Amino acid sequence: MILRFDFGTPLHTGACVLSLPVQKDPVPFLTVSALAEGAVTLSLPLGQGDMLFGLGEQVGPVNRRGRRYVSWNSDEFNHTEDRQSLYGSHNFLLVWREKEPFALYLDDPGRVRWDLGWTRRDQMTVTSENGDFSLYLIVPEDGEKVCLDLCAQFRRLIGRSYIPPRWALGYIQSRWGYASAEDAREVAHAHRERGIPLDGICMDIDYMDGFRDFTWDHKAIPDLKGLCGDLKEQGIHLIPIIDAGVKKDPKYDFYREGHEKGYFCRKEDGEEFAAAVWPGLSAFPDFFRREARAWFGKGYEALLDEGLDGFWNDMNEPALFYSPEGLREAFGALEGRREALETGDYGAAFEMLGAVGGVKNAMADYRRFYHETDLGKTRHDRVHNLYGGLMTLSAAEAFERAAPEKRILLFSRSSFIGAHRWGGVWMGDNFSWWSHLKLHLRMLPSLNMAGFLYCGADVGGFGADTDEELLIRWLQLGVFTPLFRNHSALHTRLQEIYRFPAWETMRDIVSVRYALLPWLYSELMQAILWDRMLFRPLCFDYPRDETAREIEDQMMLGRDAMIAPVTEPHATGRNVYLPEDMLCVRFRTWEDRDLIRLPAGWHYVRAKEAEFLLFVRRGSFIPLCRPADRSDYVSTDSMYLVGWLGGEDAALPFYEDDGTVRDPEKEKGLSTLKAGKGWAWDPKGRKLDTAGLC
Amino acid sequence: MILRFDFGTPLHTGACVLSLPVQKDPVPFLTVSALAEGAVTLSLPLGQGDMLFGLGEQVGPVNRRGRRYVSWNSDEFNHTEDRQSLYGSHNFLLVWREKEPFALYLDDPGRVRWDLGWTRRDQMTVTSENGDFSLYLIVPEDGEKVCLDLCAQFRRLIGRSYIPPRWALGYIQSRWGYASAEDAREVAHAHRERGIPLDGICMDIDYMDGFRDFTWDHKAIPDLKGLCGDLKEQGIHLIPIIDAGVKKDPKYDFYREGHEKGYFCRKEDGEEFAAAVWPGLSAFPDFFRREARAWFGKGYEALLDEGLDGFWNDMNEPALFYSPEGLREAFGALEGRREALETGDYGAAFEMLGAVGGVKNAMADYRRFYHETDLGKTRHDRVHNLYGGLMTLSAAEAFERAAPEKRILLFSRSSFIGAHRWGGVWMGDNFSWWSHLKLHLRMLPSLNMAGFLYCGADVGGFGADTDEELLIRWLQLGVFTPLFRNHSALHTRLQEIYRFPAWETMRDIVSVRYALLPWLYSELMQAILWDRMLFRPLCFDYPRDETAREIEDQMMLGRDAMIAPVTEPHATGRNVYLPEDMLCVRFRTWEDRDLIRLPAGWHYVRAKEAEFLLFVRRGSFIPLCRPADRSDYVSTDSMYLVGWLGGEDAALPFYEDDGTVRDPEKEKGLSTLKAGKGWAWDPKGRKLDTAGLC
């Protein structure tokens, strides 16, 4: 059951698809207090064993209790443990406690602060700085698995998640620095030549003509359509980046049109707002306006015409390097302190660093421009967290117009709940740190709760220099995440698999992904179509298992599987907790694998560098298929089952479709794989390989 | 056996106390190549199972293979995983391999780059940028425990480690922000009132008169001697910070004397070098000169006269906020790009950030000044890594003059090998991150290898805001480290134990430290006097145990114990690997503890938030004493043994002295505790409590 309460004058954010009546009764569970300047605080006493889950894209443990967070979409490169905001804001929180568990969702486009037992461990407070929001309270309807129920109810409230094309589950290679057709062809060739599977190549900002959206450098890419076609023949999709800011350049048609039609955000005095991003001074489309979205969407449509069918939206928090106003203020501050600086005044020195560093993503700039929302002229900071998601909507609406039948790949850096219906997300600009490999794993369930199923982090790490072992271990996690992209930043170590001596090991890992792809696709699609999570903390499935509550380095995957990646350097194994009997599949290649039957409890399981682990519940199985170096060559014509049936018959719901149709009929794609002692077949009556069943 | 090879013209750094003949034969193991500009590279092929240990104070795993490091003492606040330099440089590396294991030490005062299998996993290269250094190669002499042997030989080469006073093993409370006598008295009172043990209070920079070394703010501290005396009556020592930079202020006597006598570093043109640090423009003593050290040391002597007997040296890399020259250059760069900035040129924006951010600890500044070394006028960057340690020597020489019989507490931020004879170190400005709790543990053995036994990290974390659970878990590690200091930065959450609702839990943890203190002191002193490590990776003690090689979150402690702290939020236990049968002591308070006999192998061991674990090898025991709230009240008159004898008799070498005498006779302090079934006594014939023996 979901109850809605309104505070102040909520904006219609589009996050929810169910239109619920507004309750007039007092809010249960939470104590509501009004603060100064319109802010509203919701507070809740916390009992000793209470656990808090959710908040989507944030650093920190899966159980978020004891920490502080701020919903404020931020271009935050330095994801250290104390960061309170990343690129997306996902105001869903699940309060799991013995008595009266519930979940809450703040449909609030502005800044929200979450003190989840940090100031006082027995108290949680949530503060909406605007004070204008809809609060949804979700209480369990049935079943013992309360968390799963609460998440499913929430997902019904916010609507069906984005469905990617099946090929988007293939391996994607990306790097900030790919600038030309030659670069793309070389990457394609290097993979194909070595048999490293590949379905996509992401082009970062350098492919553009001076960083102008929807353009490309015609010298470097003389024939985009030809390039797309050639690559597609090899099964490889080109995926360009699109940034939120549009270069303020009167000679640039796209800008001129947006400017003339008044589609850009304006300052209070009506002047077009501008700030520096990659192209230099840029204007920012007012994605709150349908007609601005339609205009911006035409850019995507034009690229679709060139043969592109995948996009990533970036810089859409929006990131602002600086505004001319902010810069002038910083210079002014410097000038005023110059004399003090000369005397060695350390305070002045820190002011100088602060003033100059503070020009980036400055709150003052987010207060300089306005949107036209359904509440009228609205200052950006009050609706900041919607901006990136509405850019995603602009693309989705364009795809709907231009290719209503076809799925287009789309993922974004910035997001809010609602945008999960229009695209996926990647986890932003992480680093080549082992701790970010762990973070990748930990963020999966909270993003799933918020509706983002097509997601993943930059495998190998974006910033800083990776090393071979880290990349291998990270690929072994990426194998299981829907978005499986290797991406790295300019000036960092080259990170394509083929750059490393151990590329064959890496190729074999990616090949396992392709062997698992039909099963992963089936699990992902079922999670999308039936409002389930693909990745879940163990305790969601095993609510009475107290040990399971603390396991944050393993995740349940799909209906019956569990992953437990190695996340420490030099390790040749790890401790794994099994909440029930499971089969451990230890992969070296998709064919060379060990099957180990393990009883419930703790086990130290070997997993040397070239090995990785997948666990399957006893009484179930998973299907593997013969891999290929492109996803469309991986078919379900022959399936190899692995599982531990222990003499019983077992069945696995299996979803399949053509991988491209926008709105699949969910029942039509669903069938059942069945297996027992010495036999297994699919619903078409084809026999399946049972050598991996025990 | 140790072989010495000289390259170029090595400076006498004072790191080694043995004077070994210089070999003329070719260097074994390593391939030596000369690079451009005088640099010299040593390279070594790495076999698959080879492991690399050492490098003292650095981030990353205990086994350092696969990573890059740079020996360059750095004031580096943001200790993320990819940092390659911290505050100290410790050029000792142990190459553990099946055939011909060895260790190497580069006695090199300049910048050294370590590529430990990062570029190529099968290759290690060490590059001395100066090319002037002594290389020591150590080969095993005897025994199966090769790593322990190599470390012990190295420690004999570099001489006996600093001996702290016994009270320095007590709990120390510190905070950047304590500024007055009132602050110190309040901290003392708040601890004493609640029975939280305390032996020291650190005063950070704010106690000084305008950040001038060896002064204090007479308004805030009208009677320093009285304050010291009052606190000492309560068993609490005041420990002031001393910074490397001396305020360039002609009205400040100490500066004037240094200036007039020419003790400060000069630029090439002979002018005194100045850079901004906390006091504003400051001059930097040339600690390479004995007479400059003697002059600077008089400052410590004057404070000794006030009753102080502990010091921490800081900012001695040296940290430089900026030099006037560097600042002018940065401003110049800004001016030149101002026009570009106005057009939103992102390149110019990053240049601006780079120019302003780059004024701090700039290499250009480290090349602006000179020292007088035994090689004559020497540019600072060529001997940079010695600077902080020579400041420590300046203090140590002063103590030798002023209080030759007494131990004075001294620890430093910056260090090199050699300085381990004069003082301890803390691990620098860490953060309130769980990963830094882990780093604290991991850095202990490498610092021990480098001779730094009196060491520890800022418990609770210096930067960022701690939370109660993190502080509790960190205290549970700090209990075992010789330096046990809670320290935090200005503007962060107040971090004294008594600020938290769970202060009683924290008090009980600290009380266990005091119950263990005589044993810890005995183990520390034995490690110092017999050139052993206090903390060791498991594989050093169990070289044939392959699992032990991967365990980096447990450490052997002293002769027979092992620690395994909980380093994850929300955990109520952890997996522990026992290389042999051990007794697990699970502490809640020093008296309320569980004794669990565990066989060798993996175990999931419960350790709820208020509980922590100590393991003791089967066949041995450790003594506990009745704790007090100050270390001098903890006596060995009554001892409670805990251990798992299993029917056998056992003996423990036990060291004790008065805790203050500078140069203890090592044999005199050593005795043996003996225990068997139902009996135990100390060498004085006193009966010991055997209720904890099984």
Image: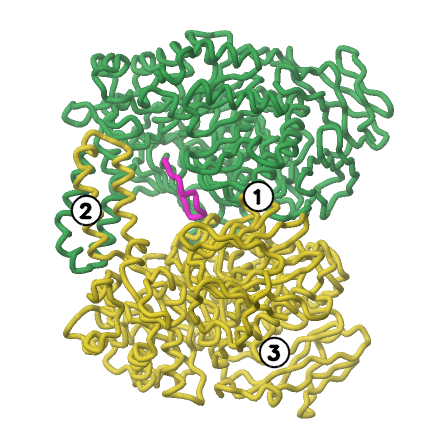
Chain colours: A green, B yellow
Question: Of all residues shown, which one is farthest toward the bottom?
Answer: B684
The reply to whether residue B584 is visible in this rendering is yes
- Of mark 2 and mark 1, the one earlier in the sequence is 1
**Foreground: B19 or A657?**
B19
Q: Which amino acid does label 2 sit on?
A: Phe
Which residue bears the numbered disc 1? Answer: B120
Which residue bears the numbered disc 2? Answer: B331
Give the x, y percent position of residue A167: 57, 18
Residue under the image location 37 percent in, 34 percent down: A73
Q: Which amino acid does label 1 sit on?
A: Arg
Give the x, y percent position of residue A131: 31, 36
Is A77 placed left or right of B682 in the picture?
A: left
Task: Specify whether disc 1 shares its chain with disc 3.
Answer: yes
Magenta residues (range): A74-84
* Callouts 2 and 1 close, C-beta under 8 Å: no
Foreground label between 2 and 1: 1
The reply to whether residue A418 is visible in this rendering is no
Mark 1 vs mark 3, CA separation in Å: 38 Å
Task: Specify whether disc 2 shares its chain with disc 1.
Answer: yes
Which residue bears the numbered disc 3? Answer: B530
Depicted B150 relative to depicted A536: above or below: below
In which chain is the residue bearing label 1?
B
